[in-house]
Amino acid sequence: MPAVLLACIVVFSPTLQAAINLDRTRVVYDGEEQTTTVTLTNENGSLPFLAQTWLTDSEHRKISTPLMVLPPLQRIEAGGRTLIRLVKTSGIDQLPQDRESLFYLNVREIPPKPEKVNVLQIAVQSEIKVFYRPQGIKPVKDDIWQRRLNIRKSGQQLVVENPTPYYITVSNIQRQSAAKAASSLLKNRAFMIAPKSSVNVDVKDPSVREFSLYYVNDFGGHPELRFSCQQATCALVDKQTH
């Protein structure tokens, strides 16, 4: 009976420890720049890994235009680090210039071939969001566009409207009450609102009067915005947060 030399499983999981790590959780591609870089680090101190990289569009379809990533495959020595570059292609002018466009950067680690037979290898694949931000909508310094979110109640849901040209990711919405401990109001996970659009969000307690909304900023932080509701309308409590 022939021996099984190698079995390799590709796992896409944000919780599984990867050997190849990225230096950020999101990429904001400034439309003024021709290229932007991301650092990859091999956290394994004893083994080299290959890093395979590619981009997909908002529907997770693999693309090579209007952005591409270089190099698509490279070796990273044990404990080493390297750069990948996201670059524009000739199709960049076809993107909307009045709002951000969404892409995904994918990084798959390929472990070295094991010396022993009958070894199961797990290759971890990571994915982060890439926001292409055209030059014409570059925000002014310290602008907190997430403060412009409009929120209202509708039945068992909150309707969250994003009037801005930027994608906004909401990581959590928590109840704020002196009588009850802070707890998440979201029935499901974090959500993202596309530019100039709205989403309906299921909540555990639609009668809530005060809550904190946590969003993800350009640097991966989770600042807080507080809202107070009167009947169906929820207004921002004027507290500057970065």
Image (cartoon, rainbow, N blue to C red):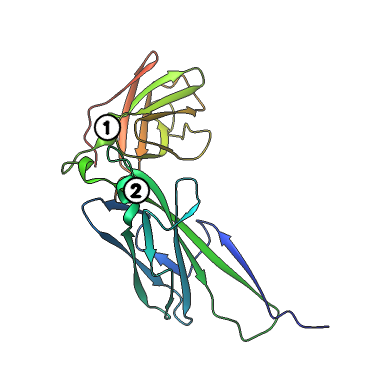
Expressed as whole percent of the image width and height from the top left, the position of residue 57 reads 44, 49
Report the residue that reaches farthest toward the bottom.
115
Report the residue that reaches farthest toward the top.
231
Nearer-the-camera pick, 222 or 3: 3
Q: Which comes before the other along the chain, label 2 or label 1? A: 2
Q: In which quarter of the image is the C terminus?
A: top left
Given the image, on which type of amino acid does mark 2 rest?
A: Phe
Expressed as whole percent of the image width and height from the top left, the position of residue 119 reads 67, 77
Nearer-the-camera pick, 172 or 210: 172
Q: Give the image quarter of residue 172.
A: top left
Residue found 43% across the figure and 24% down from its top: 159
CA distance for labels 2 and 1: 19 Å
Q: What secondary structure is found at the residue carrying circle 1?
A: helix
Q: Mark 1 points at which residue?
A: 147
* Drawn side of residue 165 relative to residue 20, left or right: left
Residue found 28% across the figure and 41% down from its top: 97
Disc number lying in front (2 or 1) = 2
Q: Give the image quarter of residue 147.
A: top left
Q: What secondary structure is found at the residue carrying circle 2?
A: strand
The numbered dot on residue 131 is 2
Question: Considering only vertical position in the picture, is 69 above or below 61?
Answer: below
Residue found 54% across the figure and 80% down from its top: 112
Give the number of marks.
2
* Drawn side of residue 130 relative to residue 126, left or right: left
* Drawn side of residue 141 relative to residue 152, left or right: left
Report the residue that reaches farthest toward the front.
90
Expressed as whole percent of the image width and height from the top left, the position of residue 155 reads 50, 17
Given the image, on which type of amino acid does mark 1 rest?
A: Arg
Q: How crowded is mark 1: few (under 14 residues within 10 Å), some or many (20 or more)?
A: some
Expressed as whole percent of the image width and height from the top left, the position of residue 186 reads 48, 33
Q: Do the residues labelled 2 and 1 touch (CB within 8 Å)?
A: no
Q: Quadrant of the N terminus?
A: bottom right
